[in-house]
Image (cartoon, rainbow, N blue to C red):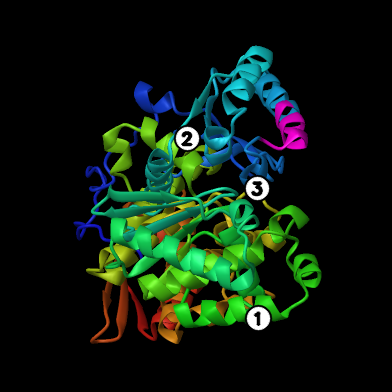
Amino acid sequence: MTGKLKALPKTSDNDDWDPFGQPLFDDPSVRALSRVGVVDIGSNSIRMVVFDGAARSPAYFFNEKVMAGLGQGLAETGKLNPEGRKRGLEALKRFAALADGMEIGPLTCVATAAMRDAEDGPEFRAQIERETGLKLHVIEGVEEARLSAQGVLLGWPEAEGLVCDIGGNSMELAEIKNGKVWRRATSQLGPFRLQMVEGGKKALAAHIQETIAALAEQVGTDHDRIYLVGGSWRAIARLDMERREYPLLVLHEYRMTPEGLNETIDWIGKSDIDKLRSKTGTSAARMELVPLASQVLAELITQFQPKEIDVSAYGIREGLLYEQMPERLRRRDPLVEACRHSERVMSRIPGSGKKLHAFIEPIFGPLPPERFRLIRAACLLHDTTWRTHPDYRAEACFENVTRANYSAMSHAERIFLGLALLHRYKNSRSGSRLESFLGLLSDEEIQQAEVLGKAMRFGSMFSASNPADAGELDYSAKEGVLKLKLSKKGRALFGEVAAARFRSLANALKAEAQVS
């Protein structure tokens, strides 16, 4: 599990849900982030992202990429690729027009290795500003490392280890610890650069080895985790999923062992690249760089000896958004804030999730923070798919959570949350096409998710306003008894359907149901 939050007190209607605090959505300094546009001009791709960033875990309001290949051939010619310049300028003109149409204000535009290293970089920058009106910031490698690391922290607040961001012409490393960015280093280990190394395979291997050894001296090797940022790394991770027949094709927080990743790198080297590209839907331009990126990754594993390698879908663009966040927003739990935002805009009765959580909390008792936050998140999301056709709500809940752009949540936690919400609408999961995902959970976790789902299923329909007004739950695992003490109002509400759902919850707990 991911959390490192302090233990939380029992909830009440009057608390402010520490450490999450009161909602920040109406704070002017936070609402200013509701539409933040960023353009990242890299050596291989140029991408525009518009974040819906009022929540701590931002949604992607708009996301478009062009594989311009600006840095292709740069190591040989010293100049930007002419065709890349043409395609890049066309893309940037489109992005400027889109931003104007969206009325989102000035785009934050950054350019990395290709633009800073090319002889004609300053001239192209001037042309961009002249023809598009976009103000371009060409950043140094260590600044690129810092922003990429901040992007990881945006989506993974407790992350500690080494962020490794690979682009077409460079590779940056940054140490993250205690929520801050520490040592940083930059290199020219991008695949476009490596294509130009002379002397054959042995010379290339020696070059990669020597460069990474120099980087290790700058950032140290005492890192248990490596966080991978960049399209080439994500392509390799997607291939790792393919080799393993992994069921959940969400790259963010996908975790690999050094041994397993080395097996995948060997498998890539022995496979037909075109067939792999076809299977995974990877673009030809990206797949072309995978073999060289794999070689770099293998050497990183050899020299840094991490215990785990994790994929971050967040990088420099998200780092730019993180840069603009107020400190009090940075401190929030991204998952809970995103779920609160979803409840606010998608549920029938915003605020009902907090009341539901307070009602079912006695079933669970004191919990470690990482499980507490999942129960809270589930309650916030319990009514956000009400517009879906009743026959599909259960699976829609599961799909929404497991594939949504939520961060600060491991894959196992995604499945746990999805399964709990499935049981919010459906007693049985037998025969569901989603059963293959459950292999990521232990039997105990599956049972806990079912209990949570059935608790929400009962509590959400027991009362149309606040279930606590209708009754109070008490559960003793030692005695194996689940009690419901009804109020005067609750006696009228405890009808046939409510009684059946209460018994179903008791059965999931393997407890006797008692009503008084």
Name the image quarter holding residue 274.
bottom right
Q: Are marks 2 and 1 in contact (CB under 8 Å)?
A: no
- Marks 3 and 1, how far apart in space? 45 Å
Q: What amino acid type should be assigned to the residue bearing mark 3?
A: Arg
Taking 457 as reference, is 437 above or below it? below
Q: What amino acid type should be assigned to the residue bearing mark 2?
A: Gly
Left or right placement of residue 472 versus residue 340 in this view: left
- Marks 2 and 1, how far apart in space? 39 Å
Q: Residue 171: x percent and y percent?
A: 49, 52
Left or right placement of residue 236 versus residue 5 in this view: right
Q: Which residue is mark 1?
A: 267
Q: Main secondary structure of the magenta part?
A: helix
- Specify the segment rendered in magenta: 80-89
Q: Name the residue nearer the viewer: 116 or 14.
A: 116
Q: Residue 321: x percent and y percent?
A: 44, 35
Taking 404 as reference, is 486 above or below it? below
Q: What amino acid type should be assigned to the residue bearing mark 1?
A: Trp
